Image (cartoon, grey):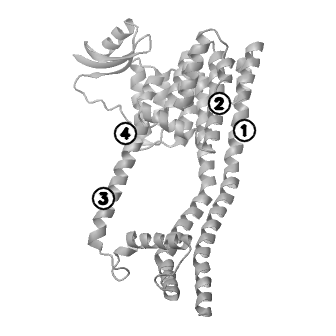
Amino acid sequence: MKFVYKALTKDGKTVTGTYDASSKEALIAALNKQGARPILVHPAGMKDDTKSGGFNLFKPKVKLRDLVIFTRQLSTLVSAGVALPRSLATLQDQAENKYFKTVIGGVTKDIESGIALGDAFAKYPDVFSEVYVNMVKAGEAGGILDEILKRLASQTEKDATIRKKIKGAMTYPTVILSITIAAFFGLMVFVIPKIGKILTDLGGPNAKLPIYTRVLLDISNFSLSHSIIAHIPGLSAVPLIGKLPNLIFLLAIAGITGFYIVKYIHTPKGKMKFHRLLLKTPILRTIIIKIAVSRFARTFSALTAAGVTVLDALSVTGNAIGNKVIEAELQEAAKEVKNGKPLSEPISQSKIFPAIVAQMLAVGEETGQIDTILVKIADFYDEEVDTVIESLSSIIEPLMIIVLGSIVGVIAASVMGPIASLSQNVGNN
């Protein structure tokens, strides 16, 4: 029988091909003898349904809460010495989410076929993130899977907490911004045209108006001619038939553009550019760097404490951080370490890692307690992340009030100033 397979070689390369074997198990055994680790094995001609990526709005989802519970329970079972297939089967029975139950079942079958847990998780990127998968691979490489799973559960909980805090901090500003935009366009469509007529009546069609007033009237005319109001009979003379196809075309172009932008971001090149953009964004840059430093410190300390070499630990840690720009910096640092330099030296030259990280690493290298010091760094930056998130609302709310006040002030000056000036001119005449 012919099978299609995908496997990892000893040097980390991915190979694919077809092979004649009596059974799936026989092919896996043959690959293992060749020093290759099978990732995917299925009969030739059978559709590969393990690819769960892509953009599907109606695809079932797994909540972070379910993933946290699964990770903690799996960690407990692994720590107790329960075999992985049996642990996964137990968790599959307990799962409430039907889709998650199916995913765990698929992972269990892969484990029974000889596939590593990290590689089995990697088949479901919509459930297990790249960071999650690489952390599990790190645990398997260092023989500390139970400890890594505990940290993953805590990290997943912290990610969920951070998301919740960010949403909470952004709720008030989002509501204010939405009301401001709605009020602005309401004024542009309903109020400013009438005021424009008043100004024209007072000063005539050739009246000299301030530039900011003319800009406001131009925005009003544009908003009126392109708004939904313009298509309602009786409220505007703009014909519906002439404008509606253009609006549909513009919406379609916007939707297609958005789709391809998201698709491009998921490519290696697009992901690198997107992550670089995030690191240039104020506030977000601070949060991302602090989270990355915390993840780096915790993962690297766990691996080095388990006896994993510095080079291997850097490779796995870079993948686990979740930002391609920072991962590239760690890869460059690994090259420096390979040439005989201590890790603290390339980290000290980094444009992303704070100086205190390199200083603490240098102390750890001198005292031989690098894992202990890195844990302290991780704890420190975890607290820093919490502080930044909590201060978001206090930073954003005043900014929104300033923006709202500025808009109101500009509109008031654009309207009241010309009216007062024209009224005075009329009175003098």
> Which element type, helix, strand or loop, lies under badge 3?
helix
* Proximity of marks 1 and 3: CB atoms separated by less than 8 Å: no
Label 3 sits on residue: 249
Q: Earlier in the sequence, mark 4 or mark 2?
A: 4
Q: Which dot, 4 or 2, sits closer to the camera?
A: 2
Q: Which dot, 1 or 2, sits closer to the camera?
A: 2
**Marks 3 and 2, how far apart at CA:** 45 Å
**Marks 4 and 2, how far apart at CA:** 30 Å
**Residue 157, placed above or below residue 365:** below
Q: Which dot, 1 or 3, sits closer to the camera?
A: 3
Give the amino acid at mark 4: Gly
* Proximity of marks 1 and 2: CB atoms separated by less than 8 Å: no
Q: Nearer the viewer, residue 41 or 391?
A: 391
Quadrant that contains the N terminus: top left
Q: Nearer the viewer, residue 108 or 242?
A: 242
Give coordinates of residue 84: x percent, y percent: 49, 22
**Residue 44, placed above or below residue 174:** above
Label 2 sits on residue: 293
* Proximity of marks 3 and 4: CB atoms separated by less than 8 Å: no
* Crowd rating for badge 2 (residues with CA inside 10 Å; few <14, some 14–19, many 20+): many
The numbered mark at residue 383 is 1
Give coordinates of residue 315: x percent, y percent: 54, 19
Q: Earlier in the sequence, mark 3 or mark 4?
A: 4
* Crowd rating for badge 4 (residues with CA inside 10 Å; few <14, some 14–19, many 20+): few
Instruction: Answer left or right for 297 relative to 47.
Output: right
> Which element type, helix, strand or loop, lies under badge 4?
loop
**Marks 3 and 4, how far apart at CA:** 25 Å
Quadrant that contains the C terminus: bottom right
The numbered mark at residue 54 is 4
**Residue 54, placed above or below residue 428:** above
**Marks 1 and 2, how far apart at CA:** 12 Å
Query: Going 44% across and 10% down the picture, which residue do you hit?
Result: 10
